[in-house]
Image: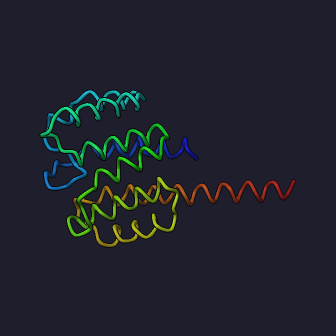
């Protein structure tokens, strides 16, 4: 299951993240185009997730003008890629400190859905997937697709488990 999660997160983050427009008011997106070209992205693309997280932590700590919300979000992502879910959850929560559902309701639903997935809470994931799926603007259509795919992982995992159980009972 962890390998499926890792592959999914890698594919979706690099597929969707590269085509999104930058929104300076959204804590989950970046501040400038230059930010998109930093070394941490290359490190993460090549499976060096701990190194990518370390680079981002350094950048965030050494430059007071950086968007800490975006940095912490991405630190959480790369720890999730490395299957370090406790660290991923910690940094993703840090990325939203001082923010609330009132700031950006749709991103909040996405954030809560991501947390639910990382914490293996299928019911919470479904709740926030349903909210985002039914109420998203075009800007958040990719986020809704990500939550749908995360929820589908649970369904696929359950189906495979059930299939294995049935086969074992027949033997």
The quarter of the picture where residue 137 lies is bottom left
Q: Which color scheme did the rendering employ for the protein?
A: rainbow
Residue 50 x, y percent position in the rendering: 41, 31
Which residue appears at 24% of the width and 61% of the height? 99
Residue 161 falls left or right of residue 139: right
Q: In this figure, what is the number of numbered marks?
A: 0
Residue 79 falls left or right of residue 139: right
Which residue appears at 26% of the width and 31% of the height? 58
Residue 165 x, y percent position in the rendering: 76, 57
Residue 87 x, y percent position in the rendering: 43, 44
Figure check: 13 above or below 106: above
Work out whether residue 103 or residue 139 is closer to the camera in this orientation and state it: 103
Which residue appears at 35% of the width and 50% of the height? 92
Work out whether residue 50 or residue 8 is closer to the camera in this orientation and state it: 50
The quarter of the picture where residue 64 lies is top left
Residue 162 falls left or right of residue 91: right
Q: Residue furthest right?
A: 171
The quarter of the picture where residue 44 lies is top left
Residue 101 x, y percent position in the rendering: 26, 68
């Amino acid at each position: 299951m962890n390998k499926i999660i890792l592959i999914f997160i890698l594919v979706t983050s690099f597929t969707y993240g590269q085509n999104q427009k930058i929104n300076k008011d959204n804590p989950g997106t970046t501040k400038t185009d230059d930010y998109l070209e930093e070394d941490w992205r290359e490190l993460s693309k090549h499976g060096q997730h701990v190194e990518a997280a370390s680079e981002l932590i350094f950048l965030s700590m050494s430059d007071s003008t950086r968007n800490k919300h975006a940095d912490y979000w991405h630190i959480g992502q790369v720890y999730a890629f490395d299957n370090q879910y406790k660290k991923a959850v910690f940094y993703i929560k840090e990325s939203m400190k001082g923010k609330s559902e009132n700031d950006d309701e749709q991103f909040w639903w996405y954030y809560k859905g991501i947390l639910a997935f990382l914490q293996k809470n299928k019911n919470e994931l479904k709740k926030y997937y349903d909210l985002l799926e039914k109420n998203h603007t075009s800007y958040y259509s990719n986020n809704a697709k990500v939550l749908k795919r995360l929820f589908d992982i649970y369904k696929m995992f359950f189906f495979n488990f059930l299939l294995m159980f049935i086969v074992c009972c027949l033997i």
